[in-house]
Image (cartoon, rainbow, N blue to C red):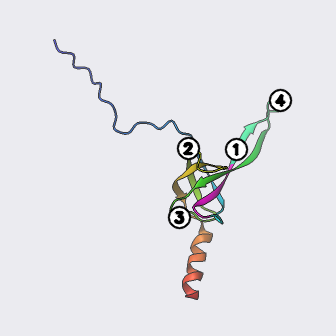
Amino acid sequence: MANTTNTATPDVQASRRNEKVGLVVSTKMQKTIVVEIEMRKAHPKYKRVMKSNKKFYAHDELNSARIGDVVRIREARPLSKLKRWSLEEIVRRSSLSQIDEKTVAEVK
């Protein structure tokens, strides 16, 4: 009898790197965005849900993200003093960025 158990490994291996979804608050640097993430956590004693914000610097190779976009960032190796994340994808474009594009096109 031959051993016919299915031991095929999946092509896409699940990444162990941490991912976060947040809002782009600054794009003033070259190839860098600042993403603010809102964390909700119950207070240890009073059990009230508290909000806290934290900013992460992420690498944006194509400078594609704009202020107000909702983006997914993934942990990466240290790229600079503060940058330890990279832009994975733009989840939702901001309506403000679409208005800015129209005004720039009208000016030209």
Q: Residue at x 55, y 51 (%)?
A: 86
The residue under label 2 is: 77
Residue 23: horizontal and vertical position, in percent?
64, 56
User: Spatial distance from mark 4 to mark 2, Cα to Cα?
Assistant: 36 Å
Query: Amino acid type of disc 4?
Result: Lys
Which of pointers 1 and 3 indicates the residue nearer the eye?
3
Which of pointers 4 and 2 indicates the residue nearer the eye?
2
Is the residue 28 above or below the residue 54 in the image?
A: below
Which of pointers 4 and 1 indicates the residue nearer the eye?
1
Query: Amino acid type of disc 1?
Result: Met
Mark 3 or 4, nearer chain start: 4
Query: Amino acid type of disc 3?
Result: Ser
Q: Residue at x 52, y 59 (%)?
A: 61
Residue 65: horizontal and vertical position, in percent?
56, 63
The residue under label 1 is: 39
The residue under label 3 is: 64
Proximity of marks 4 and 1: CB atoms separated by less than 8 Å: no
Proximity of marks 2 and 3: CB atoms separated by less than 8 Å: no
Q: Residue furthest top?
A: 1
Q: Residues within 10 Å of mark 3 (few under 14, many from 20)?
A: few
